């Protein structure tokens, strides 16, 4: 009896502590609490999984908006300017980007490792290494085909909660200090509808890509300019490639360098293969910005975006980066696994204690019965 009791107790404790809980659980994304963003004429212009007043974005139509009101799962944005693509002789950061000899180095990592693609992976979120890791590996492979030196860091920053960016910040800093990359990208997938990202070009199923920049970053303006250059370059090559640039209230570990960006590689409801199909086009855009040999571009001109605002405001570069992640509001997983892990953990602990208590109670009761019988026998 003692051996069986001990075995059951150890088994339950092992399950509770060392799975880790959630490793075998995943959530099938059926719904998403994303926001629909409308302009002042009540025209739908965007979908976003998390929105705050003051966020701004540039649409594929080269219009810039700022969010001024949120009502339930609806948000409203006012147009603050028009952008136009122009040719510039050189990028403002060309000296920085092309200072080193080719091949250049690009670092990749994932803040939200659990993110997955429901149609392909079966779940929108898989605790540990989700489908987003496959996307990062595919991006790495395509960049290497373009002769880049690519470092993919698959360090886990789980769970997917408000502290994830603090944990991934350690990874981002380590990568930057170790490799001094020419660019560094945090790879994500979004939490909105499939229709916002899906596109078919010449019979090929593809996924659009969103660029995210953090305003709570002292280098925001430089990151933003690089994002606009990449956006303009990519969409001048392939008008469908980038859905938008979204400037949120977080910092997203982008203060390390002006070429640190966050990519939303499709959404949880799109097929992962569609994202794979788009990656070569993204690499071509990145390559056109980071490394554009003179012989392939004799006039050394690169598409860029020139501000043409009638009433726009320039974001301040004196924003202080927060010490915590309360302002990090990129996509949230349509299903947050934290509550599930807590419930399962609690249930296992309670079950273990209950079974142990029952066994010991029965053992004690059996012993008492034996003692009573012995006493009765001795009394006779």
Image: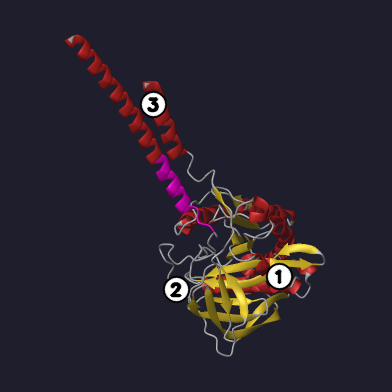
**Which residue is labeled 2 in the image?**
319
Determine contact: label 1, label 3, CB under 8 Å: no
Residue 98 horizontal side relative to residue 54, left or right: right
Whether residue 35 appears in magenta in the rendering, the answer is: no
- Which residue is tagged 3? 6
| Image quadrant assignment for residue 97 | bottom right
Mark seen at residue 81: none
- Viewer-side residue, 190 vs 361: 361
Quarter in which the C terminus is drawn: top left
Residue 341 x/y as whole percent: 46, 48
Q: How far is disc 3 from disc 2 in space, using C-alphas? A: 57 Å
Q: Is residue 154 left or right of residue 61?
A: left
Q: CA distance from mark 1 to mark 2?
A: 28 Å
- Point out the stretch of residues depicted in magenta: 335-349
Q: Residue at x 61, y 71 (%)?
A: 227
Q: Give SS at disc 3.
A: helix
Q: Mark 1 or 3, which is nearer the eye?
A: 3
Q: Position of residue 331 (x, y in %)?
A: 54, 64
Query: Is residue 342 part of the magenta span, yes or no?
Result: yes
Q: Earlier in the sequence, mark 1 or mark 2?
A: 1
Q: Quadrant of the N terminus?
A: top left
Q: In front of the other: label 3 or label 2?
A: 3
Q: Residues within 10 Å of mark 3 (few under 14, many from 20)?
A: few
* Mark 3 vs 2: CB contact within 8 A: no
Task: Give the residue at x 45% y 53%.
Answer: 339
Q: Which residue is mark 1?
A: 234
Q: Is tag 3's residue or tag 2's residue first in the polypeptide sequence?
A: 3
Name the dominant secondary structure of the magenta segment. Answer: helix
Q: Name above or below for residue 269 compared with residue 90.
A: above
Task: Give the residue at the far right of this rendering.
Answer: 202
């Amino acid at each position: 009896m003692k051996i069986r009791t001990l075995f059951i107790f150890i088994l339950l404790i092992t399950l509770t502590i060392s799975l880790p809980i959630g490793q075998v659980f995943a959530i099938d994304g059926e719904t998403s609490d994303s926001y629909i963003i409308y302009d002042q004429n009540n025209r739908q212009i965007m979908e976003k999984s998390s929105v705050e007043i003051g966020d701004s974005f540039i649409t594929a139509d080269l219009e810039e908006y700022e969010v001024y009101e949120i009502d339930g799962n609806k948000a409203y944005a006012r147009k603050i300017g028009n952008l136009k693509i122009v040719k510039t002789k050189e990028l403002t950061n060309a000296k920085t980007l092309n200072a080193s000899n080719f091949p250049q180095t690009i670092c990749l990592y994932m803040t939200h490792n659990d993110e997955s693609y429901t149609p392909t992976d079966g779940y929108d979120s898989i605790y540990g290494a989700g489908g987003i890791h496959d996307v990062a590996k595919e991006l790495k492979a395509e960049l290497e085909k373009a002769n880049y030196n690519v470092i993919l860091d698959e360090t886990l920053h789980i769970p997917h909660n408000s502290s994830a960016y603090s944990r991934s910040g350690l990874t981002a800093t380590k990568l930057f200090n170790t490799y001094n990359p020419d660019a560094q990208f945090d790879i994500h997938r979004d939490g909105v509808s499939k229709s916002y990202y899906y596109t078919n070009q010449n019979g090929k199923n593809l996924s659009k890509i969103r660029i995210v920049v953090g305003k709570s970053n002292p280098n925001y303006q430089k990151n933003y300019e690089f994002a606009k250059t990449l956006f303009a370059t990519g969409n001048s090559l392939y008008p469908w490639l980038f859905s938008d640039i979204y400037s949120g209230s977080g910092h997203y570990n982008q203060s390390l360098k002006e070429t640190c960006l966050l990519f939303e590689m499709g959404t949880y409801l799109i097929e992962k293969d569609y994202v794979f199909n788009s990656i070569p086009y993204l690499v071509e855009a990145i390559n056109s910005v980071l490394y554009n040999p003179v012989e392939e571009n004799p006039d050394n001109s690169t598409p860029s975006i020139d501000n043409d605002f009638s009433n726009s405001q320039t974001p301040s570069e004196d924003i202080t980066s927060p010490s915590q992640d309360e302002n990090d509001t990129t996509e949230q997983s349509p299903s947050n696994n934290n509550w599930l892990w807590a419930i399962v953990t609690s249930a296992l602990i309670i079950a273990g204690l209950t079974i142990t208590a029952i066994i010991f109670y029965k053992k004690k009761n059996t012993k008492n019965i034996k003692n009573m019988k012995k006493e009765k026998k001795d009394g006779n």
